[in-house]
Image (cartoon, rainbow, N blue to C red):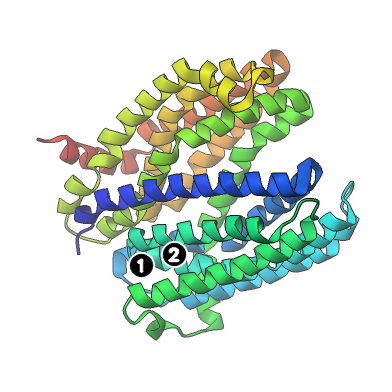
């Protein structure tokens, strides 16, 4: 089955999903902040960040690998092995939280208790990850969108109904754990309805899980490098310049991340389509499937960068107020990250779809080394502006490597682009 007839529709579904989930996340944030107050909300933010990190680590790259396998070969047989891996790693992470939480510095008893409770959400999140992997691999983005909106509506509604003014973070942790269990159940039900014979291939085998663990290790390492790359600038600014500069940079970065919504939705749809095309000997699907992936997205990145540059002042003032004036020049610089970001994401997904994990890893490591080195040099010298310039140069460095040094990948992608651009 060719991927390209459904790609445009999938992108639209995912754009709708991302805007909808962002809106529901904002609603949830408003409710929790008002019910818990500033201190309680800060406690929740710490707990949520810890579990987000745990979920990213315990997924261990199984989602990216299985999306590729399902899209290319329509093979669901490795889903049980992925679940075993994620549940095992989640158990290790939960045990670590139970041991470490009581000795964390500057944390109240409520935070410790809430972190312990919410860490168990990694177990239903493992089921949720496997189910959504199946939906994405099958390119059922309409069902994936409905699921995402439902599971993001649940916490907002539960917080509104069950949290009261002056509540602590502990009942919120219990509530969110229950929400994750319900969300995993909904995800399983949607897979049962949308994918014929979904449970037929479910056979649990420890050797299969060990084999899959070895296969996913490179992708997991790529994910860890990606997390470090995303967070290192904030950590270095906090260490070298202090909280005020870190806050200005973070504010600009949040606007930049929001501007990636359409691109990230498109890339979410593109990856399984790329994997499906890579698994086919026919090159015809490239022409229709990836017209958006290059022609539209690169032009869109350039337009978005230009818009952010000129709208930086009104956007920053509207969102954050007058205290965030230094975020305006920061956003004007960071806006130009969008163009190399688009190139890098396209090539990295294309590389993963074509089993070129080592190449993607080398390029990401080069970007991380460049970012750390330039931050160490330019933040003490130029402060906030130095961090922004370092981000631009690090992204551009990765794009340059993809476009010049990665000869094999570049030649394949060039053939793709030339096919797309022909009238």
Q: Within 10 angstroms of label 1, few (less than 14), some, or many (20 or more) residues? A: many
Asked whether 179 or 400 is in front, the reply is 179
Residue at mark 2: 133
Is there any visible trace of residue 330 in the rendered image? no
- Mark 1 lies on a secondary structure that is helix
In the picture, the quarter occupied by the C terminus is: top left
Closer to the eye: label 2 or 1:
2
Q: Tell me the residue at 73%/53% (across/down).
A: 47
Residue 154's quadrant in the figure? bottom right
In the picture, the quarter occupied by the N terminus is: bottom left
- Label placed on residue 70: 1
Residue 387's quadrant in the figure? top right
Q: Is residue 85 above or below residue 349?
A: below
Q: In this view, does 161 lie above or below 356?
A: below
Asked whether 410 or 60 is in front, the reply is 60
C-beta proximity under 8 Å, tags 2 and 1: yes
Q: Position of residue 266 (x, y in %)?
A: 35, 45
- Mark 2 lies on a secondary structure that is helix
Q: Position of residue 145 (x, y in %)?
A: 40, 57
Report the side of 18 relative to 419 (left or right). right
Q: Within 10 angstroms of label 2, few (less than 14), some, or many (20 or more) residues? A: many
Q: Tell me the residue at 60%/34% (across/down).
A: 369
């Amino acid at each position: 089955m060719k991927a390209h007839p459904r790609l445009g529709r999938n992108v639209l579904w995912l754009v709708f999903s991302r805007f909808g989930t962002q809106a529901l996340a904002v609603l949830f944030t408003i409710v929790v902040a008002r019910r818990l107050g500033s201190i309680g909300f800060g406690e929740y933010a710490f707990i949520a960040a810890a579990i987000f990190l745990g979920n990213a680590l315990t997924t261990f790259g199984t989602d990216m690998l299985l999306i590729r396998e399902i899209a290319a070969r329509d093979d669901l047989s490795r889903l049980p092995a992925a679940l075993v891996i994620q549940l095992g790693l989640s158990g290790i992470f939960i045990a670590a939280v139970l041991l470490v939480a009581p000795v964390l510095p500057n944390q109240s008893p409520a935070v410790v208790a809430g972190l312990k409770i919410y860490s168990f959400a990694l177990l239903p999140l493992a089921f949720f990850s496997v189910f959504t992997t199946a939906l994405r691999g099958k390119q059922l983005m309409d069902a994936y969108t409905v699921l995402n909106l439902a599971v993001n509506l649940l916490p907002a509604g539960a917080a509104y109904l069950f949290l009261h003014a002056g509540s602590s973070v502990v009942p919120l942790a219990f509530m969110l754990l229950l929400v994750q269990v319900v969300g995993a159940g909904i995800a399983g039900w949607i897979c049962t309805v949308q994918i014929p014979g979904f449970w037929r291939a479910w056979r649990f085998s420890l050797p299969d899980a060990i084999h899959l663990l070895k296969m996913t290790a490179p992708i997991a390492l790529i994910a860890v490098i990606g997390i470090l790359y995303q967070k290192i600038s904030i950590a270095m600014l906090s260490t070298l310049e202090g909280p005020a500069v870190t806050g200005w940079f973070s504010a600009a970065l949040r606007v930049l991340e929001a501007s990636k919504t359409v691109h990230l939705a498109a890339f979410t749809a593109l990856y399984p389509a790329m994997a499906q095309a890579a698994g086919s000997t026919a090159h015809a699907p490239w022409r229709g499937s990836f017209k958006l992936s290059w022609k539209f997205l690169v032009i869109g990145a350039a337009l978005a960068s230009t818009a952010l540059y000129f709208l930086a002042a009104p956007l920053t003032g509207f969102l954050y107020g007058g205290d965030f004036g230094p975020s305006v020049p920061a956003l004007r610089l960071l806006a130009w990250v969008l163009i190399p970001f688009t190139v890098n994401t396209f090539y990295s997904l294309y590389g993963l779809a074509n089993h070129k994990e080592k190449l993607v890893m080398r390029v990401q490591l080069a970007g991380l080394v460049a970012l750390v080195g330039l931050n160490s040099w330019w933040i003490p010298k130029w402060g906030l502006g130095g961090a922004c310039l370092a981000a631009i140069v690090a992204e551009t460095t990765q794009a340059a490597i993809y476009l010049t040094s990665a000869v094999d990948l570049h030649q394949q992608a060039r053939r793709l682009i030339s096919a797309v651009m022909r009238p």
